[in-house]
Image (spheres, grey):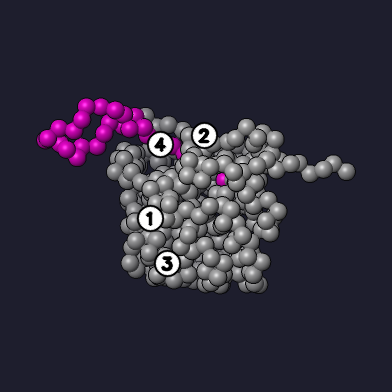
Amino acid sequence: MSAPDRPRHDAEQRLHLVVGATCNNNCIFCMEEDRVTRQHRVEAFTRQDFETILQTNAGRGEVMFVSAEPTLSPWFLPLVALARDLGYHTIGIISNGRLFAYPQFTRRALDAGLNLVMLSIHGPNARLHDGLTRTPGSFDQVMQGLANLAALGRDRVVLRTSTVVCRRNWEPETLLEHSRLLGPRVQQMVLNVMQPFGRGLAHLDSLMPPYSELVPRLARFYAARQPGMPPAYLVDIPYCCTEAAGIPEEFRGFVERYIYYDRKVLEGPPPTPLAPDAPPAQGPLELLTRDHEDSCNKVRFPFCQQCRHGAICDGVWRGYVARFGQAEFAAVPAPAKL
């Protein structure tokens, strides 16, 4: 995640390097539902492809290793070192944190140049976290990973966490317990409201909270926060839903802009009996942006053009509108001129 400010100029968009082909968690709300296609796409990249992408975009200064679980890529550590050598000032990862439970790996990653780690931690205890990741032991491992990063990184790594907020962990008391747990070690926590896409869409009825029911709970959480808890930035919810709702303005949403490269899977003949698991044909590298993703998966209403947040809001998930409708959304008028 980027800093909690308004969208930055395009020249300052960070690079997301999609290196993770597989994941050792099985999150119930994972956006990447079609894991086979994702694996084929990512594995179609060569190490030279990744090196070329890093070299081409070095002027951006920021790179995040993303997709599935990036630490499982055999090229993760060499690419981190290359990014350092190319002069990237921010070299980060979005990770489930489990491999950082091993001190030797943590030390190697930090020595290679990793200086920003966003750990996915979805609850203050194993019951909640492991239930959402559907991976027994994942909570203990990510917490050990956080401890290792804090001890070995000290002044050379920024530690942040990402928590997907859904019906299982949305109560203020749970979020407060989560904040107390993370407080001593984390500089920032991000509350990502569950996205009704991929597996999140498949489990929408059981996990997706309507924004109108979620926001009052979040407001009670923010009102009860105590000194020593890390800043908690709320994202992935339209600005109009949190307007004048008791959520501090400085924590209320931001939009991260980034670019990434992908390979399209080309249509071809169906698999043959001799090669039923053969990967599909791969197309050329394609440069994409966060805005491209939003235009495909989100919708904006006609009244959004009159909203004071219209220029920075990234819209509403199509899957959310299909399930809950649009009654919760309205244009926020501009402040009255004095």
Residue 160 percent across, percent down from the top left: 53, 60
At mark 3, the secondary structure is helix
Q: Position of residue 4 (x, y in %)?
A: 63, 52
Q: CA distance from mark 4 to mark 1?
A: 24 Å
Q: Amino acid at mark 2?
A: Ser
Which mark lies nearer to you, 4 or 2? 2
Would you call the spot at circle 3 few (<14 residues within 10 Å), some (14-19), or many (20 or more)?
Answer: some
Quadrant assignment, res 310: top right
In this rendering, position of residue 33 left or right of residue 123: left
Q: Are marks 1 and 3 in contact (CB under 8 Å)?
A: no
How far apart in space, not on screen, are marks 4 and 2 (Cα)?
17 Å
Instruction: Report x, y in % for residue 330.
Output: 65, 42
Q: Is residue 284 magenta?
A: no
Which residue is label 3 attached to? 128
Residue type highlighted by circle 3: Leu
| Residue occupying the far top of the picture | 268
**Magenta residue span:** 256-283
The residue tagged 2 is: 295
Mark 2 or mark 3: whose residue is earlier in sequence: 3
- The residue pinned by badge 1 equals 28
Viewer-side residue, 81 vs 286: 286
Q: Which mark is residue 228?
A: none
Q: Is residue 136 above or below residue 300?
A: below
User: Where's residue 124, x and y in %?
Assistant: 48, 69
Q: Which residue is mark 4?
A: 262
**Of callouts 2 and 1, which one flags the residue occurring earlier in the amino acid sequence?**
1
Q: Earlier in the sequence, mark 1 or mark 3?
A: 1
Q: Which residue is painted at 85% across and 41% down in the image? A: 337
